[in-house]
Amino acid sequence: MSYPVTPTASQDVLHDSNYSNISRLKHYCRQRIGHLAHIMTSLENDFVKNHAREMQTHHWWIGLNYQVVEGHFIWDDDDTEATFTDWGTNKPQGGGEDCVALDYQDGYMWGDFPCTMQLFPVCKAQ
């Protein structure tokens, strides 16, 4: 089951009830509407977080990671470094936690997690 929502006419976001590791969900989002979410502003972040709260599920993958260079968070869709972030308490942690998700245990603020964890995706239209 999919949950399409539209914050603005030019930006479609999909919270989906499929869950898997981030590699599979990157492919899944590309097939569905575009890519894992690239969150650029606090307004967009609040929209995505509020919808995640309404879904009452757990963590949600977004398209940010530092799998290439530790500490440099890069968006999957355009390979740019993050300029806006919403890190949770004591995050990012580093180590083997290279992919970023909305952390339901920390008010849906951003947390870094192992990319192999099976979480839900936030997909965004291109």
Image (cartoon, rainbow, N blue to C red):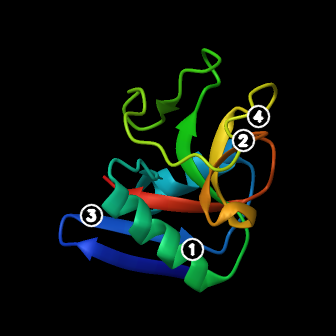
Tell me the kind of residue under disc 2. Answer: Asn
Tell me the kind of residue under disc 1. Answer: Ala
Mark closest to the chain's N terminus, 2 or 4: 2
Instruction: Tell me, for residue 11, which label it has, or none.
Output: 3
Identify whether 80 is placed above or below 105. above
Residue found at x 71% / y 76%: 57
Q: Label 2 vs label 4: CA separation? A: 13 Å
Residue matched to label 4? 97
Mark closest to the chain's N terminus, 3 or 4: 3
Mark closer to the observer (3, 4): 4
Mark closest to the chain's N terminus, 3 or 1: 3
Identify whether 37 is placed above or below 48. above
Mark closest to the chain's N terminus, 1 or 4: 1
Q: Quadrant of residue 28?
A: bottom right
- At mark 2, the secondary structure is loop
Question: Is any atom of residue 72 visible in this view?
Answer: yes
Q: Label 2 vs label 3: CA separation? A: 31 Å
Instruction: Tell me, for residue 52, which label it has, or none.
Output: 1
